[in-house]
Image (tube, coloured by chain):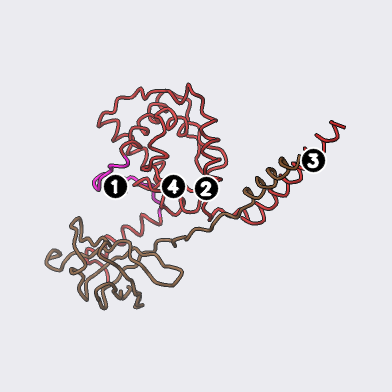
Chain colours: A red, B brown
Amino acid sequence: MRFLKWAGLVSAFLVVAALAAVGYVRSTGLRARATPGALETRVARTMRSLAISSRDRARENPVTASEEALQSGLEHYADHCAVCHGNDGRGLTDFGRGLFPPPPDLRAPPTQELTDGELFYVIENGIRFTGMPAFSTGTPDGEAESWKLVHFIRRLPQVGEADLERMKALNPRSPAEIRLELEEERFLRGEGPP
Amino acid sequence: MNRMLIMAVALAGALALPAGVSAHEGHVHKVLGTIASVQATQLDVKTTDGKIVTIVFDAKTPVTRGKAKLDAAALKTGDRISVDYTEGKDKINTAKTIKLGESPAARK
């Protein structure tokens, strides 16, 4: 009798879970152009927190926060991260806006309150079911680059216009974008018909 | 038993809540041309192929000539201009950045 009761309970839960899954898929259309609800955001952040071990969380940045390290982090960020996160870290880029979940505002407390170890873990390992890739190369040099990136992410809330301009010049561009940029420069110099 | 069932249904309901669709800004377009007319918050650009593109801007829109930052008062009819803008769902083109060409004196 007791077995039947539990079997019924488990079956009911599975049916409800299946209905919830179908409801979720149908109601969202699995579209990426949506904003995660508060519940989804909280569940995802809790999961991420659970996924990072206390040992990884407690890791300290072994790279000194020198100006050289910050500039190296800036260059790396502009080349690898800005396409989704934006040069200013707000995530308001074409790619960023189209991702689900969207990249977080790196200047905001939910990111800035992560430990250096957590930021490093996310950069190195990525996050499943999101647009965040794993950048680990498995080499000491690669790790050092990621730690410099951690320093630069800490700098993002205070990033100035000179840094933004420098990053703009370092952002990856397609041949078509380079062509358009050259065309614009020539036009603004007064070359060619108006 | 009943309480557990209610909790399961509540959880299912929460998971099935549709996520709100966010407003999505369009892609950034670029137009090259000359200023055909300019008003306080709007300008018409005559493109290199003769079309007129109307673009709105505000006091926060960056206006530059080379590395110099200017304000909207620097926009003059006939100036060469490059504008990065987005087209809204309401078909209104909003400037993100406005770059002015070198002044004729600088070109000499």
Quarter location, residue B92? bottom left
Residue B91 appears left or right of A8: left
Mark 1 vs mark 3: which is more N-terminal?
3
What is the three-letter code of the residue carrying label 1? Leu
Secondary element type, mark 1 = helix
Which residue corresponds to mark 2?
A38
Mark 4 vs mark 1: which is more N-terminal?
4
What is the three-letter code of the residue carrying label 3? Ser
**Main secondary structure found in the magenta portion:** helix
Residue B83 appears left or right of A10: left
Q: Can residue B63 be seen in this view?
A: yes
Q: Label 4 vs label 1: CA separation?
A: 15 Å
Q: Label 2 vs label 3: CA separation?
A: 29 Å
Mark 4 vs mark 3: which is more N-terminal?
3
Residue A139 position, x and y percent, is 45, 24
Residue A65 position, x and y percent, is 29, 28
Q: Label 1 vs label 2: CA separation?
A: 31 Å
Q: Label 4 vs label 3: CA separation?
A: 42 Å
Q: Can residue A194 be seen in this view?
A: no
State the extent of the magenta-drawn residues as a range: A156-175
User: Badge 3, how many Cα within 10 Å: few under 14, some, many 20+?
Assistant: few
Mark 2 vs mark 3: which is more N-terminal?
3
Quarter location, residue B105? bottom left
Which residue corresponds to mark 3?
A11
Which residue corresponds to mark 4?
A84
Same-chain check, marks 2 and 3: yes
Which residue corresponds to mark 1?
A164
**Chain under callout 3:** A
Residue A166 appears left or right of A100: left
Residue A61 position, x and y percent, is 36, 25
